[in-house]
Amino acid sequence: MKTKEFNFFCKNLFDKLPVPVDFLDKDGRIVYINRCFLEFLGLNEEDVLGRVVTEVEPTSKFLETLKYRQAEVAKRHVFSNGKEAIVHRIPIIDEKDNLIGGFGMLLFDDYEKLKQVTEQIEKIHKELNLYKNEIAKMNRAKYSLADIIGESKPMKQAKSKVKKLARVNSNILIIGESGVGKELFAHAIHNESERNEFPFVSINCSAIPENLLEAEFFGYEDGAFTGARKGGNIGKFELANGGTIFLDEIGDMPLYMQAKLLRVLQEKEVVRIGSNKVVKLDVRVICATHKNLEQLVNEGKFREDLYYRLNVLSLDIPPLRQRREDIPLLVQSFVEKFYKETGLYREIPEEVMNILCNYDWPGNIRELKNIVERICVNADDTEVTVNDLPAAILNKTFRIEHKKNQGLKEIMENIEKEIIISTLKECNNNKSLAASKLNIPRASLYRKIEEYNIESENK
């Protein structure tokens, strides 16, 4: 290209740019400089063109760039007029390896402004890291094996299996009735695994409205749908990347969502709603349900292919009625927690513990925890009494005992005896006060004490 044509080309292209640009020949003479660069230097075109770069700008390092044919990118430079900038100096070499010139550009023509922007970026970066750390803390597994209370044989077997499951990355299905602590086991598996330094994200499939499930699972872009948060939102699967996602109550997931989940599990990637960008996933999936998924498959309510994809490994959590020996340990832990939270000390006597151990606990540990808290609150003294127990538990316990080996008369007599003993203890053996609490005449109380031989038993 001839010099005239070259200058015409450069003026049409680079004079319109708000970035300082210049071209040098192989001897270091300036053959083109745009308006932006001239304004930066405070010079006119006739003061610059045809002159060696160091004559125009004594501090220039461009001649060294041409000599050594080594590009310098994003270098800080202080000009003779006192201005600072980040500059590019690039040698131009043809296909025969001949030096034909150089290209210069100021990446940032106001160093102080650049410094301010850099400091602002660093500040934002620190804040972003802080938020990331906070998000990471929010999405950590809270419980370990040590938090799972139980020394019964079924619980020891379940804890032992947790350690085995934690060694691999296969999907897990945790099965158990409501309230048995399925989520605690999911936390423990994650904490025992090599993923324990990465997020643990929990999501309850039955607690999210059906029309929001996809957005919650996979995220969405800004404006993806009416009511979408400005700036979009990251989905739970992306949030769990590198770690574990726990899908509780998987049996309640609608069929259309099951198909989308299956695809994510198969492809190991996710696409946010309103986006075309594919995000690769490295997530371990743990699911839990209190429902019979095989039955749901047979009824057409759960996809068979998804069931087999999720049920690679399984963990059955026994209900509380199948490990009654763990009930005293659980009760004691709940009483201790109550004391730490309220400062109120409570004791559970043997007669109360026996009733708690004989109850079937259809709500399992969750129900037991609620009842223990209730009786601790309702107790008038340090020692909880039979009177503090809910009537429903007493009634069901009576029925259980009846089913085992007692007649109705014997059941009622035993319970009446236990209640009288408990009330007398509560009243420090003050029979008048005990009779008043039991709402019976004092003479009737004396007769029952003699009938049940209570005083001789308590001596």
Image (spheres, rainbow, N blue to C red):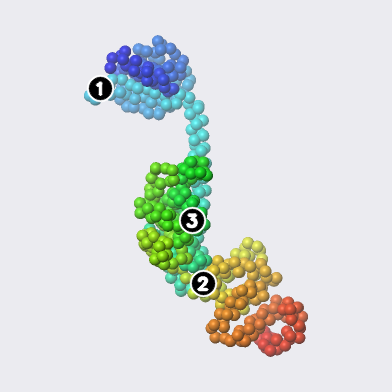
The residue wearing badge 1 is 98
Residue type, numbered disc 2: Leu
Residue 59: give x, y in percent of width and height. 41, 19
Q: CA distance from mark 2 to mark 3?
A: 25 Å
Q: Quadrant of the C terminus?
A: bottom right
Q: CA distance from mark 3 to mark 1?
A: 64 Å
**Residue placed farthest to the left in the image?**
96
Residue 386 versus residue 76: which sits nearer the camera? 386
In the image, taking residue 297 as reference, residue 233 lies left or right, namely right
Q: Residue at x 70, y 70 (%)?
A: 380
In the image, taking residue 455 as reference, residue 200 lies left or right, namely left
Q: Residue at x 46, y 55 (%)?
A: 200
Secondary structure, mark 3, is: strand
Q: Residue at x 30, y 18 (%)?
A: 26
Q: Quadrant of the N terminus?
A: top left
Q: Quadrant of residue 341?
A: bottom right
Secondary structure, mark 2, is: helix
Residue type, numbered disc 1: Asn
Q: Which mark is residue 320?
A: 2
Residue type, numbered disc 3: Ile
Residue 130 visible in the displayed image: no
The residue wearing badge 3 is 203
Label 2 packing within 10 angstroms: few (<14), some (14-19), many (20+): many
Q: CA distance from mark 2 to mark 1?
A: 85 Å
